[in-house]
Image: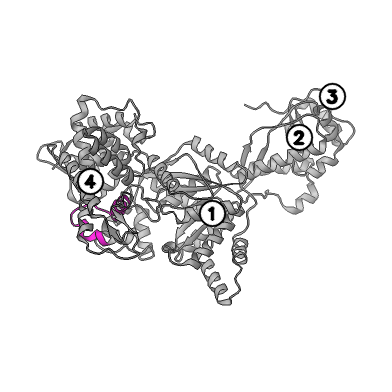
Amino acid sequence: GIVPPSKSFGSKTIFFISFKKLKTFLLSFFNMSTIAEERIDGLYIPIDSPGDLLKNEIFRKTYEPLRNREVRIIPIVTLWSKELGRKSRWEWMVKITGKYHLWSTTWELLMLLIKRRKLTFRIGIAKKCRKNITPEIFIKKLHRIWLDSRENIVGVSLKSWLDIKNETLFDLKLRDPEKIREAVEILNGIATKYSPARAEFYTRITGRILYSLFSRYHYSNEEIIHLRRICSMPGTNMVLIPTHRSYFDYLILNYILYKEKVTIPLVAAGDNLSFFPLGIILRQMGVFFIRRKIRDDIFYTTVLSCYLKNIVAAGYDIEFFIEGGRSRSGMVRSPRTGMLKMLSENGKNAGRKLFVVPVSVTYEKLKEVEDYKLEKTGAKIPEKENFFSRLKILLKTRYGPVYIRFARPVYLGGKLKEQTALRIAEYQERATTVSFSALFSTFFLCMDKVGSNDLVEKMEATLVYLKKLPFVKTAPALENLDVNCSRLIRRLMRKGDILETEKRGEFKLSPEAFHEFSYYKNSIAFAFAYFLIPFFNEEKQRAVAIDFLETFIKGFNYSLVPEDFFISDKDKKWIKKLVFCFFRENFALLQATLNELRALKNLAENQSRTELAEKLFPALSSKFTSLSIDEIFEIIFFLEKKLILVNNLKEIECEAAEFFAEEISKIIVLMEQEDSIV
């Protein structure tokens, strides 16, 4: 929609000149005449060398009539490859062609034809320039705007990984040789070895692999444009915080950013992935590794914090998983604030503004859910154990579509508040797409038997209510329920996850599939919680249920329910049964956890939530078939918030626990009164 320039300055722009003006161009090329006197509505000015422009008399004479007019400067940036800042032209050719000669233009046209697939062309935001300024000031402003626009697209002139590592050692100001050796060893374990050329090579390969595994990527172009706008803010670092449901999260997000020409961030990962050959590849793609447990190692924390400060100061964008490990329940886990706190402090020290962008990555199918089920029977399998055989299995599976959503950014101030971390987790989960697998799993888990026609009818009705929630986005597969439901039922019957009952056309879930279906169902708990609350008539029970669910489910905030959200009398009965069954086990788990804690005579000193959850897991998992340790962790988090677990998890307030257990019992009894639920 921008009007093309009516004039072009310099011989480099010969291909923008009309035949009528060719005579003027030839004369100006030999410095025999200035540009003809006529009104200039638009001027194209190459700004590669502002010094040469200042010396050029033709430019000065061209600019003179423009001094009394208001000028809008529109920066245009052209990049020829992912080796940002370098053009595909040999140095020796410059001596022959020069910078502003006809052969230079011919060479660039040739490069456009040969390397068109590596071309990035971006038009920036117009900036006003005041009247009556000297050519020197105008060129300076012109060049500054162009440089800013270029920096917004390609990023700042970033320091190499080796410079950042050396500066970190220098900033630590260590004198003890033993400490220096320790710091070097720690930094060697942490530091990325980012190489733009190799990162591009690996990203292209992973992109091809991902396209063979996943049928489609769904994401919004508007959200991508919004990311670019954040990057365009001067002195700003973008911090991407995705949900962590799979090992594919990082690779998918990395490829989407690369494909959409958004600056690739450096990524913090656990050192459990730093093994040969994966560690070498990931380091060259921009990954730096952090130990899983660093709470008690003060020196390691100091070195890491100093390294992060230099990354932030250098202008790198950063990505990390605030949940720590992958979610075993399907829901977003409570945030671990250590990394976020370090970034918050270092952003302030480096004089940079940090904006956190919560990201949700949702899958229709995940092979890793089967691994999560196996973890219940024993310890977690280390990633490097049988790496190639496990990788082969992952690459053989076909996963269906993936949904990527970028939530609205959160400004990260100099002092991190707990509420900020919780808000990030809330935005993450609320951005989760309601997938076909999640809604399908919900009906099979919460209903004893399901007829195919009845299933489609009730899923369609549920979708109508879900769409009333303004923040809920549903998967495209849910628009064609007739075909997709029958197709998936047939596939799952062959697999043995769904069994046909004695009545033809009626199906039930196999006990073996409970764990996998629970995982997908839990991913939409944040949306279904809004269905549950209106069914509590007693104000006290309603308040307890809201309080518990808002802590247990990070994306649930009952204050956001729209005024026109109500369930019709026609659907009330079966929806009530559905949501009571959906959440009954969560309340039962809370009750069972309270009972187990009261049975423990002494709680251990200095134990973390994770350690306490691991201690409770064996007893609780025998009562709940699809239980994950993440759910126990969230229960403990809630009991801490309600001051039932106090003194850093060392004591339990028996009176408060007794009172709360009584209220939970009433809620469970209410839920069990519905027919076909018990």
Camera-side mark, 4 or 3 = 4
Image location (x, y in percent) of residue 259: 52, 44
Q: Residues within 10 Å of mark 2 (few under 14, many from 20)?
A: some
The residue that disc 1 covers is: 345
The residue that disc 2 covers is: 14
The residue that disc 3 covers is: 37
Image location (x, y in percent) of residue 664: 21, 45
The residue that disc 4 covers is: 587
Residue occupying image coordinates x 61% and y 47%: 155
Camera-side mark, 3 or 1 = 1
Q: Residues within 10 Å of mark 1 (few under 14, many from 20)?
A: some
State how far apart marks 1 and 4 are (Cα). Answer: 38 Å
Work out whether residue 441 or residue 502 is closer to the camera in this orientation and state it.
Answer: 441
Q: Which residue type does callout 1 highlight? A: Glu
The residues colored magenta run 615-638
| Sequence-wise first label, 1 or 4 | 1
- Above or below residue 312? Residue 33 is above
Q: Are marks 2 and 1 in contact (CB under 8 Å)?
A: no
